[in-house]
Image (cartoon, rainbow, N blue to C red):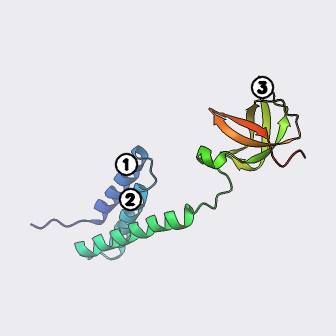
Amino acid sequence: MEFELQWWHWIVLAVGLAVAELAIPSFFVIWFGAGAALVGLAMLVVRDLSLAEQLAIWTLASLAMVFAWFRVFRSGRHKTRIGLAEGEVVGEVGLLVGEVAPFQRGKVRFQKPLLGADEWACIGDERIAAGERVRVVAIEGSILKVARSAKGGT
């Protein structure tokens, strides 16, 4: 007796891969699960797909969705800069909305959200008055270290 994959096998595989995505937070496995769901739905419409056709549909659909994800959705055209590396944040210029001093925290606001927020607590090595432009020189935990911007004040 030959084993044949049924439509519900593909749906079970799709659910299994979706659950696996929860354990592997890469947002990559989910596309193979979506491909499996697509094959399951295709088998409901066309009942006599061969195993080779099923595997071909799954492979092509999964790869097309992975390609679309990396090409279209993760192209870097984000409005925020959440998740950026420190090297990409250092050098950003913002406006001080709360005075900063060596042992006093201030607040800096950025024109575009930086690491998910447009306003951040900051520290500095010198006293800088509110209203001046500052440049990020380092990230220390959840606080930005700033210095006067070379461009000067407001």
Q: Which residue is mark 1?
A: 20
Q: Can you say which quadrant of the picture contains the N terminus?
A: bottom left
Question: Who comes first in sequence, dot 3 or dot 2?
Answer: 2
Q: Distance from label 2 to label 1 (Cα)?
A: 9 Å
Amino acid of disc 2: Gly
* SS at circle 1: helix
* SS at circle 3: loop
Q: Distance from label 3 to label 1 (Cα)?
A: 48 Å
Q: Nearer the viewer, mark 3 or mark 2?
A: 3
Amino acid of disc 1: Ala
Residue 140 placement (x, y as % from top left):
64, 32
Q: Residue at x 66, y 46 (%)?
A: 89
Q: Is residue 130 left or right of residue 43?
A: right
Relative height, residue 71 to residue 154 (above, below):
below
Q: Residue at x 31, y 73 (%)?
A: 56
Question: Who comes first in sequence, dot 2 or dot 1?
Answer: 1
Residue 80 placement (x, y as % from top left):
67, 52
Give the label on residue 84, or none.
Answer: none
Residue 44 visible from this viewpoint: no
Residue at the outermost left position: 1
Where residue 15 sits, quadrant-wise, is: bottom left
Q: Is residue 33 left or right of residue 76?
A: left
Badge 2 density bin: few <14, some 14–19, many ≥20, Cα 10 Å: many
Q: Distance from label 3 to label 2 (Cα)?
A: 53 Å
Q: Which residue is mark 3?
A: 102
Front-most of 42 and 22?
22
Relative height, residue 117 to residue 77 (above, below):
above
Front-most of 26 and 83?
83
Give the label on residue 33, or none.
Answer: 2
